[in-house]
Amino acid sequence: MSQPIHELLIIGSGPAGYTAAIYAARANLSPVLLAGPTPGGQLVLTTDVENFPGFPDGILGQELMEKFEAQAKRFGTQVFSESVSEVNFSQRPFSVKTEKKQYYARSIIIATGAESKWLGLSSEQRLRGHGVSACATCDGAFFKNKIVCVVGGGDSALEESLFLTKFVSKVIVIHRREDLKASKIMQDRAKANPKILFEWNQEVIEVLGEKSVSGVRTKNIKDDSEKIIECQGLFVAIGHTPNTKLFEGVLDIDQKGYIKSENETKTKIPGVFVAGDVFDWRYRQAITAAGSGCKAAIDAEKFLETERKS
């Protein structure tokens, strides 16, 4: 085989991928990291990050990920801005194909993350990071004593709404139906909270505001009537889509689309590990993604060490 066989190849470049690279590089595994279409992951789309330890004054998401990348490179990680189009984990060494070349590796860490589902509005995309968010835990504190809207009707939407009541003066839940999809206990908690109001049979058709959110325009799905709801923030809580399409039929994937893992980072294929939001549907935070990246790198190092000894 003319192509080199790497000890470790990392697919994905968010907090999970870069942390895995840092730990792997310091363990002399000389990792290769394929950054994908959005180097830095979802965090580069976030403005101020105030809940990542070590930055008491906050830091821009883009800047934080640039620091992650610089640290990974400092210890010898090779980073390529390439997207993976095909994987073959049926034999060793594993092979990974991008638009530019074929890579071979003795171990793999998958850190392709997940993407928030959005409404698909141009005004929504324009104001992302300027009042439009998909993470109350990340951004709720920026809306102290303000009015915010939450779009969605499932458990995630009500969890976001209840969390936001710690900061905001009012939460308006906008839902396309007359009844919620959330569990009864979550519905009871939300309906009992005096800060949470509901707008039924409404769908957001436009986010209003020039430099920041000033309101939303909604349409009643029953009679097509429109109205404007004034708010200073919009949280979209209609779910996440893990980036696992590449691994369908290769790894075990659960009903929500997340890769199944054993003992935290191990997949059903020895030598293939997962880290971050691609398997973690519960927490979805930068710090937990980074933590799982650390675990995956340590597990990969131990796997390779055991293999060398056998």
Image (cartoon, helix red, strand yellow):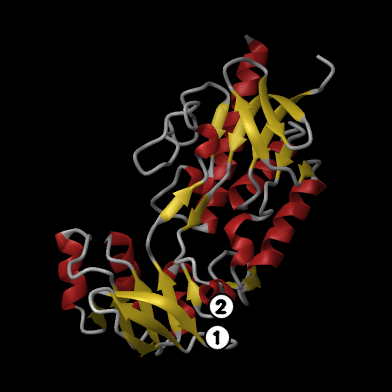
The amino acid beneath tag 1 is Ser
The numbered mark at residue 127 is 2
Residue at the spot of label 1: 212
Q: Position of residue 231 (x, y in %)?
A: 41, 87
Image quarter where the N terminus lies is top right
* Residue at x 17% of width, y 67% of height: 179
SS category of the residue bearing label 1 = loop
Q: Position of residue 164 (x, y in %)?
A: 36, 76
Callout 2: 10 Å neighbours few (<14), some, many (20+)?
many
Q: Residue furthest right?
A: 2
Sequence-first disc among 2 and 1:
2
Question: In the shown orientation, is residue 123 left or right of residue 54?
Answer: left
Residue drawn at x 62%, y 77% as measured from the top left: 57
Residue 165 visible in the snapshot: no
Instruction: Answer above or below: position of 74 versus 306.
Output: below
* Residue 163 in which image quadrant: bottom left
Q: Quadrant of residue 230?
A: bottom left
Query: Is 85 located above or below residue 137 in the figure?
Result: above
Question: What amino acid is at disc 2?
Answer: Leu
